[in-house]
Image (cartoon, rainbow, N blue to C red):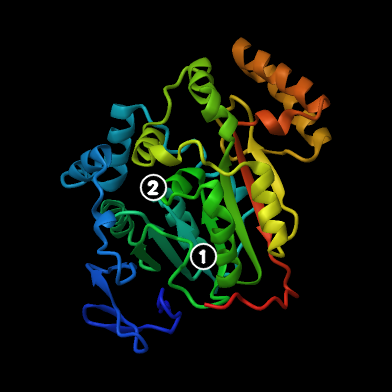
Amino acid sequence: MIQWACLIDRHRLVRKTKGHLCPLCGHLYENRKGVSSFYRPDDNGNSENRTFPLLADLRKLMETQSSDKSADIFCRKYACSKHRYGADWKFFFSVPEAGTVLEFGAGFGEDTIEIAARTDTVISIVPSRLHAEILSKRLAGDGIENVEIAVMQEITRLPLPDRSVAAIVISDAAGSGFHVGRKAFSRIAKEWQRILAPGGSVVLGLANPVYRWLGLDFLLFKMIGEQPESIQRIVKSASASDRLDTPGLRQTVRSMIRLGFNPPFISAPIPGDRMPDILLPVEDSRVVLYFLDHLIRKNSPVVRAAISVSKLLVRLNLFHRLVPYYYLYFKRSPASTEEPPDP
């Protein structure tokens, strides 16, 4: 059973019929249909009921169709690609079977199901009740019982005790939903440091903000014959004010290293390739060039041209600046003796 902690004083919460009660400050965190909401007393929780028109359409589909079929129908209708980056993190992600994994976002639930099969307990934090309802139905349809869902929006302070999770997974889309911008990233990363056990890991999917600033993400999708992902459009429109506030690769790495994480393993999906489980180690130019040499022989002329340009960028040490999406794997030292920050 997951042990939650109060957002106000970090005292351990007591499970009650209607939610989780802090015996120290007396604040009750509501639980409805197995989904907990974590908001401070000065927040009425109105943001948890934000509307997402396209996701509401998905929920309606799920009333008459299975979760898998609903997701497929939804993606065909809105030209989204729910598997574009879904498998990438599995290339290097590993947690103990008895560990607890904290996942932010969840989306259609594909990653949640994969993580749940690998470890003892999964905590999935989502930004709205609508997200929670869709995920709950998906997990119930697949018979997944070791996932606990919580709703919250502000993740610079998490309802978990110190050193209580073995790994954290968060993608760029999820980060947008939680307003993980440049200004907030350092505080959010410090909270990850607090709740992560020594030897734990953070897998962070990070979109290159340069693509968004220049509109290159749209151009890239057009070149490979696909429309921009609808779910990404939902997230962007829901957090338009934070659209240009995405933390960059350099800031992310520096912030994490300052907090005691080891330098990351950085990888990226192969440019223009449709096999999301193949990654390029961005920091090892020899490996990147090896993969690109072999890819040129099996792709379309447009993609071959793009890969040839990528090879040149590798030789000029500029490849990491133009990769549209990164996966960063951070590890916390098992011998870490850092004290968690004060409440």
User: x and y percent of residue 68 in the render?
Assistant: 32, 44
User: x and y percent of residue 9 in the render?
Assistant: 44, 80
Name the residue at 48% across, 55% down. 114
Which SS class for mark 1?
A: strand
Disc 2: CA contacts within 10 A as few (<14), some (14-19) or many (>=20): some
Q: Earlier in the sequence, mark 2 or mark 1?
A: 1
Name the foreground residue: 195 vs 44: 44
Q: Amino acid at mark 2?
A: Gly
3D distance between C-alphas at marks 2 and 1 = 16 Å
Q: Are marks 2 and 1 in contact (CB under 8 Å)?
A: no
| Residue 101: image tag | 1
| Residue 129: image tag | none
- Above/below status of 326 relative to 184: above
Name the residue at 43% across, 65% down. 123
Which SS class for mark 2?
A: loop
Q: Which residue is mark 2?
A: 107
